Amino acid sequence: MDFLVAGAGTGGTITGIARKLKEKNKDVKIIGVDPNGSILAQDPGNPDRDPSWSKGGFMEHAINKNNPAGPWGQQTEGIGYDFIPRVCDRNVVDIWMKGPDKESFVMARELMAKEGFMCGGSSGTAMYAAIKYITENPKYNTPDYTVVVVLPDNIRNYMTKHLNADWMYERSFMSEEECADVNKAKYIQDRSWGQNFCVRDLVMNPAVFVRTTDTCEHVINQMRNKGFDQFPVKDEKGDVYGVVTANGLLTRLGKGQLVNDDHIKRACVRDLRHVSLGVKLNELVRILGRNSFVLVDNKFFITFSDIFDLMVKKPEWVMTKEEYERSQAATTRNIVIAGFVAFAAGALLSKFGGK
């Protein structure tokens, strides 16, 4: 064996294996893999000699600063920490590498599809690092060298994560086209409705956004005013942040986690599904079975009712919210006019009727 590649979490696996291997062969190189967002990796030639995890016991390394977690935070589980575990002897590692989430999960899916390894994300991280290292050092890519990669997990605990194409797309680990292709019927005839329509064929109304800095009270009043029970949310920079729902607000307020004057940011859900105008409506129907609403082109908010408007012709007696409001306004105006006319007629009768 010439190389051992393993992820580092609490550090027991890589520390124990590395120490025993170096007892048998001091020339074995240990490659430690640390996910982006974690602080376990060390810069080359500048290891920490103090294994203590207490304040001042370790230094900040550039390899970690230059590889932060993505916008969703660290998604790979089982490896990486924001502190140094006592059992982790980082000085037995000869080479540290970082593992980004996207490449880790893509590799884990590839291991399942091509090798039949039902593995989790941290296995993808280790294999990604091994292939990257050998690719960058082609002199080791010969039958004369042996590289052992530790795949420490299985798919059992990740059935709703990287195994799910929707989860991958919602975190930008997969393209929209790839996600749709995974969910297409390939071995039976597809009879689903909407294959001849795209999202752009829908009648879409501009989304009403709220801000992360809006208060809970303001958003609740917006829900009352607009008749909606959810709003897409933008942050201080104007970028789409997520979505706030009536159920989420009620839960937070009911448990005392928020009060009326608090900003809604803590009540927001980040996984707002984004859909482009070219998506087929049969795919949109499938998506709405997973997500109650989607944001189209960062401009339009679509729910199941928008699909119904195209799928089922609306009878004349059914009114939209806007039509209902116009009808109510007209009714109110007519009542006021009728009341004024009745009052004027009564006054005239009172004045001239007694003569």
Image (cartoon, rainbow, N blue to C red):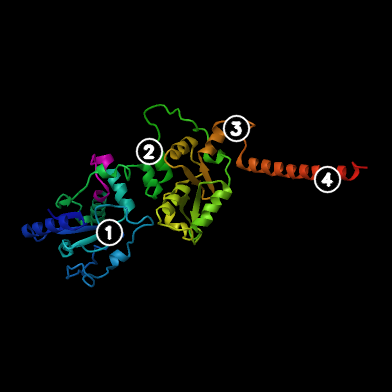
Horizontal side of 79 relative to 71 (left or right) equals left
User: 347 or 103: which is nearer to us?
Assistant: 347
Question: Looking at the picture, how far across and down is residue 348, in whole percent?
Answer: 87, 44
Residue at 40%, 42% in the rendered image: 179
- Disc with the residue nearer the chain's start (4 vs 2): 2
- Disc with the residue nearer the chain's start (1 vs 2): 1
| Res. 29 mark | none
| Residue at image mark 4 | 344
Query: Which amino acid, by three-letter code, is at mark 1?
Result: Lys
Horizontal side of 83 relative to 266 (left or right) equals left
The label nearer to you, 1 versus 4, is 4
Query: Which amino acid, by three-letter code, is at mark 3?
Result: Lys
Residue at 39%, 53% in the rendered image: 255
User: Which quarter of the figure has residue 71?
Assistant: bottom left
| Residue at image mark 3 | 314
Write the start and end of the magenta stretch as one range: 111-123
User: Which quarter of the figure has residue 259?
Assistant: bottom left
| Residue at image mark 1 | 98
User: Which quarter of the figure has residue 323?
Assistant: top right
| Res. 182 mark | 2
- Disc with the residue nearer the chain's start (1 vs 4): 1
Label 3 packing within 10 angstroms: few (<14), some (14-19), many (20+): few
Question: Looking at the picture, how far across and down is residue 125, in whole percent?
Answer: 26, 52
- State the CA–CA distance, disc 1 to disc 3: 56 Å
Q: Given contact means CB atoms under 8 Å apart, are the residues at marks 1 and 4 in contact?
A: no
User: 204 or 355: which is nearer to us?
Assistant: 355
- Disc with the residue nearer the chain's start (1 vs 3): 1
